[in-house]
């Protein structure tokens, strides 16, 4: 791998790590491009080429993954979880959650409740959406 490719990968990983750490914060392409020290257009194009999804979709998926955990492990309302993980409205949260997981947050919570006594490694295998 060339040093230019390594540098590009490092820049994209830096931005992805920032998204993983601050998933609940408002993050947009301009802010992420600044973190990666590249232009906005280059960032969006390169991120997708590197990770196989747009920065926006990656951030949505990270937020939904965290919401899934909160739905399983807490008694917080769906609305509270929505705002805690960084979504701006319950409607957008529910629609995005359904797109990614295949069912609504409430349905997911009901179906995930009996799995509370199952070790986490098994729970993850059973709660992943089918491809």
Image (spheres, rainbow, N blue to C red):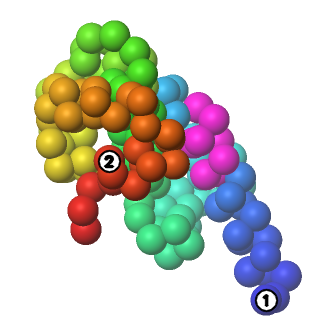
Residue 31 magenta: no
Magenta stretch in the rendered image: 15-22
Q: Which of 29/62 is in front?
A: 62
Tell me the residue at 71%/71% (across/down): 8
**Identity of the residue furthest to the right in this view:** 3
Asked whether the viewer can see residue 104, the reply is yes
Q: Quick check: 27 above or below 88?
A: below
- For label 1, the crowd category at 10 Å Cα-Cα, with few meaning under 14, some 14 to 19 and many 20 or more, is few
Location of mark 2 (residue)? 127
Q: Which mark is residue 1?
A: 1
Q: Main secondary structure of the magenta part?
A: helix
Q: Which mark is residue 116?
A: none
Asked whether the viewer can see residue 34, the reply is no
Q: Quick check: 43 above or below 120?
A: below
Q: What percent of the width, then of the height, locates residue 57?
A: 37, 52
Q: What percent of the width, then of the height, locates residue 42?
A: 55, 67
Q: Which structural element holds mark 1?
A: loop
Tell me the residue at 43%/37% (across/down): 118
Q: Quick check: 115 above or below 75?
A: below
Q: What percent of the width, then of the height, locates residue 113?
A: 28, 27
Q: Which structural element holds mark 2?
A: helix
**Identity of the residue furthest to the front in this view:** 117
User: Is 64 left or right of 111, judged from the image as shown?
Assistant: right
Q: Quadrant of the C terminus?
A: bottom left
**Identity of the residue furthest to the bottom in this view:** 1
Q: Quadrant of the N terminus?
A: bottom right
Residue 16 magenta: yes
Q: How far is the residue under mark 1 from the one under mark 2?
A: 37 Å
Could you tell which of marks 1 and 2 lies nearer the N-terminus?
A: 1
């Amino acid at each position: 791998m060339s040093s230019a490719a390594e540098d590009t990968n490092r820049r994209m990983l830096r931005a992805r790590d920032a998204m993983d750490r601050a998933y609940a914060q408002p993050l947009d392409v301009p802010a992420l491009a600044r973190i990666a020290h590249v232009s906005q257009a280059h960032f969006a194009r390169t991120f997708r080429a590197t990770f196989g999804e747009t920065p926006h979709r990656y951030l949505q998926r990270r937020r939904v993954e965290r919401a899934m955990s909160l739905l399983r492990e807490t008694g917080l309302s769906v609305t509270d979880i929505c705002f805690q993980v960084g979504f701006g409205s319950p409607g957008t949260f529910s629609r995005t959650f359904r797109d990614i997981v295949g069912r609504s947050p409430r349905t997911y919570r009901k179906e995930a409740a009996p799995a509370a006594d199952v070790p986490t490694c098994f729970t993850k295998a059973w709660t992943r959406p089918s491809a």
